[in-house]
Structure formats: C-alpha cells, structure tokens
C-alpha cells in the first residue's frame, strides 16, 4: 500500500486537528480517502456529496495533475506522491 | 519607435529598456483596454500597477462605496474617501498617478443583462470579484465574447491565480464545474483575510495582464496553470489545469450558449454574504 502526503485545505483543517498536511494510505485515490475517513471522521462527506460522487467545486491533484484528467478516483498512487485537495475560493475584496 | 512624448520616454524608461517590453511593448500597453471587475482588495493593486505601467484605457466596475474596514487592504482608497463610490475613489487615485490613463468608471452591479455590453469594448478582463455567481457570470461572458480573463481569488491566507484564455486553455467551469453549496465555504467577511494577501494576488494578476498585452506567449503565462499562494507557509505552487472537452460553455459541444441566472445556479446572491 502506498503512503502519500495529503495537503488539507484550510476549511477542512478543523477535521484534521488543524493539520495542513497528513499522511494518507491507499493504492488509489478512493482507497486513500477511505483510510483518511477512519483517521479523521467527517472528511469524506466534505469531499463527496450525498450520492457518493466527488464534489465538483473541489479538485484533487496527484502531484501537479488533476485526477479528473488521470483516472479519477481510480488514479493509482505510489509512495511519496503529493496529493492536494483544492476547493474553489471566491473572495476578492 | 512609437510616438512617445519626452515625458513618456522618461516615465516608462525602465520598461522601454527591457528587451521583453521595449518601445513596442510600451506602445501596446498605452493602447491596451483592460476592464477591472472590482475596485477592492484585488482590484486595488491591479489598478495601481496597470495605471503605473501606462495601460492606456482602464475600465473599473464596482457598485460599492469605500468603507473604513476596506482600508486594511484596499490601498488605492484612503480615510478621506470613506463613503465615496469606489469607482470614483479609484479614478482619483489613478489620475494622480498617471494622466496617460483614460479611466472609465462603471458604477453598476454586473448582471446577465449588462455584462456583455460592458465587456465588449475591452481586450482583457481582470476578475477581482468576490462571490461565486459573479465568477461564473464573468467566465461565461468572457468565453462567449472570446476575452482573456485574468482570475484571482483569495481566502484567509490562500490565493489562486490563473489566466483563462478561450480556445487555448481551460475556463473557470473546466476548473470548477459547479459552485460549492451555500454555506459550505465562508466568505472573507466571515472568515477574515490577511490584508496583504490580495496585494500579492492582485499584483500577480497585474503581471499576467501586462504579459498578455506585450505578447509574452502562452508558454510563459498562467494559461493552463493554477498558481497557488499560501501566505502563512510562504509557499507558491503551480498545478496543471486542463480544458474539459465536455465543458458546457467552452467544450466542443457547448450546451450553455447564452447567459443564465447565476444567482439561481449558485443558490446564492451575488453579494458578499
């Protein structure tokens, strides 16, 4: 199983005890979020909607690439990958 | 070389000697038409640097008035102008900085009814708005009118900057197909924002606008790249973003070909809540 670094966006850091970076485990993005949910309950429902699909204002990048243009949640992970969870932000004033 | 006055040669000397700008680039800047959406946190540094750079025609859209709580970050306004329209305060600032700039003030709220008419006269749009309905409205209008949209957004200590260039790279909907449900993302008013953060992000937008005007090329620009800045961690990163061929607005078979009701699309009003 791959161990990866997951960057948690500011709005979700209250679920990780304030941590902006946590370790994630799993061979795919989907597995990794499942394992994250056991460590940090509540995180999955912030990333997935009620139907179990990833919310469309949050993007997940493996290293520099958006998983939507890789293999989605099935994107395979390898040790040391850098995962970023990036939500849309709208502020400007 | 272009037909500069002596004062202009002196004023823009540091640009003109740069090989990447030169007299030709400076002439392009003086002839450029840039529309800045918002004269707030992001708009302030954008307007300041574009005016200083000699961008010859700058439109400013904002329907707010200067408030004391704006001055923590909106550096083109000042204590004497509290209560004044932001577009007027911004115009005063620019006119004192550089009389080469023709300032057009638009004291209106952007809507589906007026945006196409407002945008049509400009080459580049700088999105410094502050809410999701306006972000999607601006995106769709820019795609429909084939305008470059230099995007910046901020939240607490985080900033995102990119350039949406229709037909060349992705649009805002390719990046974020849908807005967050209401209440899921707090506004800056609720969550706070480090005052200098929009200064950094807006300055990055101004750089991209100038590069677009002088023709620095897509390889050098943020087309297809999302620049992330975290002020607390002093971290800058770039991620790859791609055009979605199924995008409802800029994809190969668009299904949204005219502007929609964006407040309804986002289930939220186009104001900072």
Image: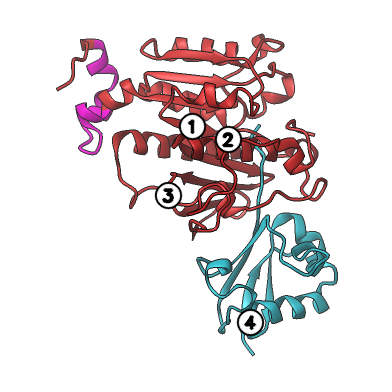
The CA span between labels 3 and 4 is 29 Å
The CA span between labels 3 and 2 is 17 Å
Q: Residue at x 80, y 50 (%)?
A: B184
Magenta residue span: B7-25
On whether disc 4 and disc 2 are found on a single subunit, the reply is no
Badge 3 vs badge 4, beta-carbon distance below 8 Å: no
The CA span between labels 3 and 1 is 14 Å
- Subunit of mark 2? B
Q: Which residue is mark 2?
A: B138
Res A28 label: 4
Badge 1 vs badge 2, beta-carbon distance below 8 Å: yes
Q: Position of residue B210 (x, y in %)?
A: 37, 34
Q: Badge 3, how many Cα within 10 Å: few under 14, some, many 20+?
A: many
Element type where label 2 sits in the image? helix
Q: Badge 2, how many Cα within 10 Å: few under 14, some, many 20+?
A: many
Element type where label 3 sits in the image? loop
In front of the other: label 1 or label 2?
Answer: 2
Q: Is residue A33 magenta?
A: no
Relative height, residue B176 to residue B55 (above, below): below
How many numbered callouts? 4
Q: Badge 1, how many Cα within 10 Å: few under 14, some, many 20+?
A: many
Relative height, residue A8 to residue B125 (above, below): below
- Identify the colour of chain A in the image: cyan
Decide if residue B203 is in sight here.
Answer: no
Q: Residue at x 63, y 16 (%)?
A: B86
Q: Which residue is mark 3?
A: B223
Q: Position of residue B219 (x, y in %)?
A: 33, 52
């Amino acid at each position: 199983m791959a161990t990866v670094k997951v960057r948690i966006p500011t709005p979700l850091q209250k679920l990780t005890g304030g941590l902006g970076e946590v370790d994630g485990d799993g061979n795919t993005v989907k597995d990794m979020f499942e394992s994250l949910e056991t460590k940090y309950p509540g995180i999955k429902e912030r990333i997935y909607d009620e139907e179990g699909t990833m919310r469309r204002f949050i993007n997940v990048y493996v290293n520099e690439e958006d998983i939507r243009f890789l293999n989605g949640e099935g994107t395979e992970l390898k040790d040391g990958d850098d995962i970023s969870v990036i939500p849309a932000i709208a502020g400007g004033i | 070389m272009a037909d500069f006055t002596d004062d202009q040669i002196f004023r823009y000397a540091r640009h003109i000697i740069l090989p990447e700008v030169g007299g030709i680039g400076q002439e392009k800047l003086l002839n450029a038409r840039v529309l800045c959406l918002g004269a707030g946190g992001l708009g302030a540094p954008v307007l300041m640097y574009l005016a200083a750079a000699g961008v010859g025609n700058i439109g400013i859209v904002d329907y707010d008035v200067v408030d004391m709580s704006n001055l923590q970050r909106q550096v083109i306004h000042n204590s004497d102008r509290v209560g004044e329209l932001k577009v007027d305060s911004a115009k005063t600032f620019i006119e004192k900085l550089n009389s080469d700039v023709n300032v057009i003030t638009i004291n209106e709220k952007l809507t589906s009814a007026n945006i196409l008419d407002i945008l049509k006269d400009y080459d580049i749009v700088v999105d410094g708005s502050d809410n999701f309905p306006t972000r999607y409205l601006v995106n769709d209008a820019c795609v429909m009118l084939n305008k470059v949209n230099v995007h910046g957004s901020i939240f607490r200590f985080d900033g995102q900057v990119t350039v949406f260039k229709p037909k060349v790279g992705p649009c805002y909907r390719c990046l974020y197909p849908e807005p967050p449900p209401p209440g899921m993302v707090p506004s800056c008013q609720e969550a706070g924002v480090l005052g200098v953060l929009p200064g950094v992000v807006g300055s990055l937008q101004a750089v991209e606008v100038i590069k677009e005007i002088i023709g620095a090329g897509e390889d050098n620009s943020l087309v297809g790249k999302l620049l992330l800045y975290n002020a607390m961690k002093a971290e800058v990163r770039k991620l790859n973003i791609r055009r979605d061929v199924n995008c409802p607005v800029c994809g190969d078979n668009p299904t949204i070909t005219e502007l929609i009701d964006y407040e309804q699309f986002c289930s939220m009003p186009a104001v900072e809540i």
